[in-house]
Every structure is written in structure tokens, then in C-alpha cells.
Amino acid sequence: MSLIRGTSLQGFTELVAELGAEAPPLLEQAHLSPRAIGDHDSFIDYRSVIAVLESAARSTGAGDFGRRLAQRQGLEILGPLGIAARTAPTVGAALQAVEQYLAVYSPALAVGVKAVPDSTLAAFEWQIVVPRPPSHRQAAELALGVALRVFRLLAGPDFLPTSVQLRHEALVERADYLRYFGCPIDFSASTYGFRFPSAVLDLTLQADSAVHAVVQDYLGTVAVPHGSTEVDAVTRLIRRMLPTGGLDLDLVAHQLAQHRRTLQRRLAAADTSFAELVDQVRRDEAERYLRDTTMPLGQLSGMLGLSEQSALSRACRRWFGASPSQVRRGAR
């Protein structure tokens, strides 16, 4: 479940080089492939992302490394999710889309916007949802830096939070944080996020409702929204966990806080099984990647949790009656 798109490290290699260090050794130490850096179609381990950000800050001497990297990223790192946000009718609707479908970008993260009691403010909050995450100060500052850029894209370049919350103490001079965020900073807070006038949520965007609807439909095929059924929940977990190569019924049952046999009975009551759902998700994901990307077939096999490319070829012939290459050519 600790996965994130390769775009989470967009600009990493260039920034490290500008600060006088070398990125390849840092990536190798964190077990990250240089080819995945900046690639939206690649999933990488989020714990490794946390580790490489911390080591980059140490090796370059830049205590604000995460915030510097955020200046090289924006809504585009979210891929189709970013399009859904950009084409929403209001800032609030855009943020709601990001909150609902963030798992498409990373199932390891969660964001939310809620009202601040007894005030005219709203609170944006960011958190890691994997159990027992390592120290992630640079990752948190990267996330809030990117969030600030997204808010300025949606609400206007003059957007400023009223305050920023950081769970850790200052990593550099406090005055640097004030210059960066343009508002007071609450260090050692109970959460990561920032507060802003709730009226910002009602600001209208130059929305394209047709594009927004299409992208929302697409996102619905790759991440099941909240309030879903038991089958939907299992399907969502299967889709998230396929690239890890460690997918099995026991692991999914554990994630849902159920016994293996209980989950099997509930799936049977819905006229399906775990194996059928895995096969269905693999088929859907294979069709989407073959249709929409030029991902090498060996890499696609790994994304689907298959042991080798020959397994993908056999599966495609069973699903589509054609080889992966023929499916890709036919879709185009």
C-alpha cells in the first residue's frame, strides 16, 4: 500500500545536481530506479521516497530541500486527477475531486478540507496513512509546498494561507518559513496543513464540464470512491496492490480487518471470488495501459503483478483473443 507515482520526485535529479551533489547514488541507496523518477506511469515505494528526500537534504546541506523541490512541481504531477481538479466548477469541487481520488496518485496519502469550528476559516490537512511511517519531515514540507502551488493555481496567484501547521520543529531559520508561506507557522502542531478563508472554496473556475465529466468517469475506473460496497473495497485494494507483487487474499483481508474466510463468504454472497476480482482488475488495467500508454510490456507485466512477460501474453490471449502488441495496435 506504500506506493506513489514517479512524478512525486519530479525535478529531484536536477535539484540535487544544482545543489552540488549527485542523485544516482542517493536513488540507488533508496532502491529507486532513475527511470521511474518523474514518470507518471511508474509506481515507486513511498517509504523509499521519504528516505531519499531525507538523505538528499543531508547530503546537499539544504534543510529546505522538500520545499525547494515543491517549486518544481504542481498540479501536473497528479496526471488525470489534476485535470479533474482543473476542470471543476469551483475551488471546493476541485479539492473534493483530489480528496476523493487521491489513491490514483498514491494510496499511501490522504488529504481533506474541513471547516474550522466557530470561524470563517477552512483547514486543508495532509497525512500519511501507511502504518508506522518513518520520519518524513522533508516529504511533509514537499507536500505542503505543492499544495500551496495548487491553491495558487486554482484560487489565484495572490492566495495566502492564514497559518500553516507543521508537526515538526523548524528545519531552517523560522524567518525562511515565513517568507516561503507568507503567513505565521505553527510548529509542533497536531497535524500537517494550513488554514485559509472558507470563501476561497466558492471561487469559480473556468471549468470545462464535459472534460470534467469524462475525467471523473475515468478516475472511477481506477479508484473506487468512498461509500462503496464490499466488492468495491476489495477491487480498490487489488488495484492498488497489484504493482507490489505481494497480492494475496490474506493481505487484503487484513487490510479490511476481516478474517480470510469471512471475506470469502461475503464475496461468494456477491456472486464473485477473490481470484475472479484479481483477474478482472488485471484485465481492466492491462486494457487501459495498452490503450493509453507506450509502457514496455515487461514493465506492464510488473504493474499487473505478473511474474514475467509471457504470463501477460497468455492472459491477453485469454482476455482479448490477441497478443498484447495486437491489442495495443488495435486500440490505436
Image (cartoon, helix red, strand yellow):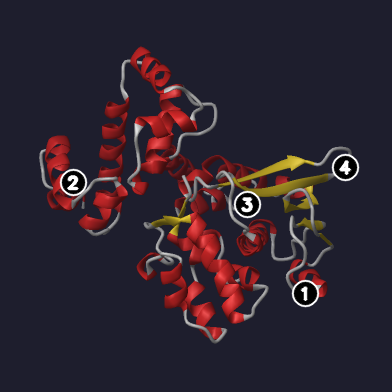
The first of marks 4 and 1 along the sequence is 4
Left or right relative to 4: residue 196: right
Q: Amino acid at mark 2?
A: Leu
Residue nearest the viewer, comparing 74 with 252: 252
Q: Which residue is mark 4?
A: 119
| Residue in the foreground of this view, choosing between 238 and 283 | 238
Question: Which residue has dot 3 on it?
Answer: 205
- Residue at point 43%, 66% (across, down): 38
Of labels 3 and 1, earlier in sequence is: 1
Q: Which element carries disc 1, helix, strand or loop?
A: helix
Q: Nearer the viewer, residue 19 or 224?
A: 19
Residue at 43%, 36% (x, y): give it: 237
Q: CA distance from mark 3 to mark 2?
A: 43 Å
Tag 4 secondary structure: loop
Residue 26 spot, x, y in % from top left: 47, 73
Q: Closer to the observer: label 3 or label 2?
A: 2
Callout 3: SS:
loop
Single out the residue that lies furthest toward the top.
Answer: 269
Q: Amino acid at mark 4?
A: Ser
- Contact, mark 3 vs mark 2 (Cβ under 8 Å): no
> Which percent across, then down, holds residue 40?
41, 59
**Circle number at residue 196:** none
**Circle 2 is placed at which residue position?**
312
Question: Along the horizontal axis of the image, is 312 left or right of 3?
Answer: left
Q: Tag on residue 176?
A: 1
First in sequence, mark 1 or 2: give its number. 1
Q: Secondary structure at mark 2?
A: helix
Residue 77 image position (x, y, % from top left): 50, 60
**Residue lying at the far right of the rendered structure:** 118
